[in-house]
Image (cartoon, grey):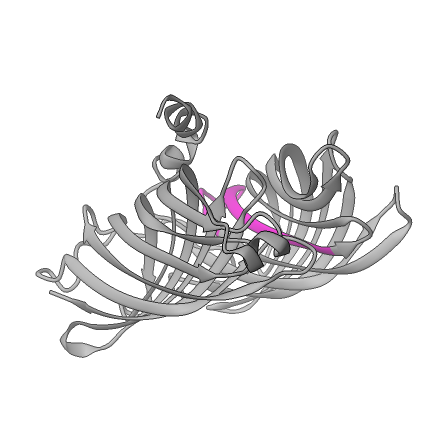
Amino acid sequence: MSSLIRRGLRLAPLALLPLLCPAAFAQELHFLAGGQYTPSLKESTYSYSIEYLENFNDYTYGTFTWLNEGHVTDHHRDGYSAQFWLRWPSASRRFTLSAGVGPYRFYDTTELASIGVTDAHGWGVLGSVAAHWYVRNPWVVELRYNYAHTTSSISTHTALIGFGYQFEHSSAAGPVWNTERYDFFPPGQRLELTVMAGSTVVNNFNSPHGVATGADVRYRLTPYVDAIGTYLNEGDARVVKRKGGAAQLGLKREFLNHHADVGVAGGFYFARDSYSPTPQTTVLGIINTRDQVLGLLTMTLTYRFEMGLRLRAYWYRTLTTNGRDTDVVMGGLGFAF
């Protein structure tokens, strides 16, 4: 039990992640795609990204970005970054140039001599420049360049282009930031129950899959913050057979006149992993069982129908201390009351 406590303490900052972000989260949502170049390997590959953007004023903003850096030799890497940006708007405010920097938490599927294939975690720095063209509210075109610098993994260049959506509509061109905060809508529906199903992908070079199921209950602490309890069964993905319960705090931002929201959450995942160490032990029926305190990061997208019905898309990233990370992507049907 003491080892579980020590692992939980190492993962404790994940539970605080939602508390470090502003309450009016993500005034813009961007989807980008492009290419990546790794100078040390002289290789190029694809790249894509999802970005939440919060405007502070005309000249500064913050982002929370997930960046997938594609596949090069011995490295399948992605990661998250919170960045602070300085922005220079044109006179019309339809075109802006900006530069940002922040810490980069990466997850690199690679092979280490001591332990073999693993999902290696580490920290780096992500520096970026971007150009935004505010075509017509709520649509934005973004061109972005990133340089990811690390000392324990590869350093990379990525160039991306894509579209963004402004959550707050305005008749004026350019970034929107002086908006009013909203209250609970509808006022009485603060508790939500959801059942879900989908797929688990283990982060190794073979990417084995499993059928995942689960359920969650969330309570709206504020119009922007949810407390979430989740049961997650990751199914049998051959090298991982894990299930358990998670407790998270989540931030969300509503748009489309309160009919939709996007959110991010972080917390602890109390899991039991039952697996066979090798193919030979699978034939013999030898199973290892391990209880662990893991980290869990979640991104969600929700559409709300009348009478409390909800459709949800979930993307869970399990964060382990032994390189057995997984991505769990699921769809869910919920009801709020």
Q: Residue at x 50, y 56 (%)?
A: 285
Asked whether residue 100 is in view, the answer is no
Q: Where is residue 255, by image quadrant?
A: bottom left
Q: Nearer the viewer, residue 189 or 164?
A: 189
Residue at far left of view? 188
Residue 47: say if magenta: no
Q: Nearer the viewer, residue 295 or 244?
A: 244
Q: Nearer the viewer, residue 326 or 139?
A: 326
Highlighted range, magenta: 53-70
* Left or right side of 74 for 258: left
Q: Residue at x 52, y 61 (%)?
A: 237
As displayed, is residue 201 above or below residue 228? below
Quarter of the picture holding the N terminus: top left
Q: How many marks?
A: 0
Spot occupied by residue 239 in the image (x, y as percentages of width and height): 56, 54
As displayed, is residue 32 above or below residue 146? below
As displayed, is residue 4 above or below residue 183? above
Q: Where is residue 324, by image quadrant?
A: top right
Residue 69: say if magenta: yes
Q: Residue at x 54, y 42 (%)?
A: 59
Quarter of the picture holding the C terminus: bottom left
Q: Residue at x 27, y 67 (%)?
A: 195
Asked whether residue 269 is in view, the answer is yes
Dominant secondary-structure state across the stretch colored magenta: strand
Spot occupied by residue 180 in the image (x, y as percentages of width and height): 27, 52
Spot occupied by residue 220 in the image (x, y as percentages of width and height): 19, 51
* Left or right side of 126 for 221: left
Residue at far right of view? 42
Residue at far bottom of view? 306
* Left or right side of 189 for 70: right
